Amino acid sequence: MAYVTQAILEANFSVERVAQFFSAQATDGSTTGAVDAATMAAVIASATDEVNELLIGVTVLPFVTVPGPVTEITGIYAMYRASLRRPEYMIDPKRSPFRQQYEDARSRLDSIRKGYMRVSSSEPPKNVGGSIANYLPESIQPNVFLSDSSSGEGGFNDGGM
């Protein structure tokens, strides 16, 4: 099951923008043309597969009900992959107008995989181990005893770590 649809892509990125990257003429550098259904299906399937690969072991796959963040991330992946069909971005993928969004989405998936974020608000948080103090803002971190290995002395810090 695909995690995003053409309608969702058009709502999030505009009909014109989707057509620009999913038309059969996109590989020729044209910015016009109708969306090619086969290209749309292939790119969405590929984006969905990539998201699934990154979420293996984190949640039950495939999703029965796709969480909003997964739909959003899959849409960004699809637009990035579709942009790479255009000659100017095939040569230099870093120039893709969706590259930064793709990088940000990838970071979100990495955070989900590591347990720092949840796939959806209905999932319980994962125990990633370690001290929670490492993830608290400095203003509320606990006072801890720190030893000074150079002098052999130690003491309590002022709350920052």
Image: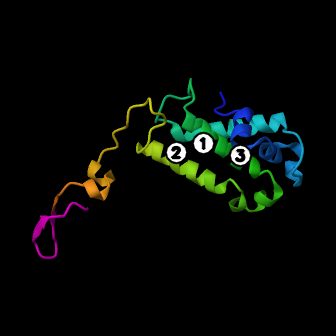
Mark closer to the chain start, 3 or 2: 3
Callout 2: few (<14), some (14-19), or many (20+) C-alpha neighbours within 10 Å?
A: many
Is 149 colored magenta in this rendering?
Answer: yes
Secondary structure under the numbered disc 1 in the rendered image: helix
Q: Is the magenta stretch mostly helix, strand or loop?
A: loop
Residue type at the position of mark 2: Leu
Secondary structure under the numbered disc 2 in the rendered image: helix
Residue 71 placement (x, y as % from top left): 61, 36
| Circle on res. 73 | 1
Q: Which image quadrant for residue 153?
A: bottom left
> Who's the residue at 62% across and 56% down the image?
100
Indicate how the structure is coloured in the image.
rainbow
| Circle on res. 79 | 3
> Which image quarter holds the C terminus?
bottom left
Mark closer to the chain start, 1 or 2: 1
| Circle on res. 109 | 2
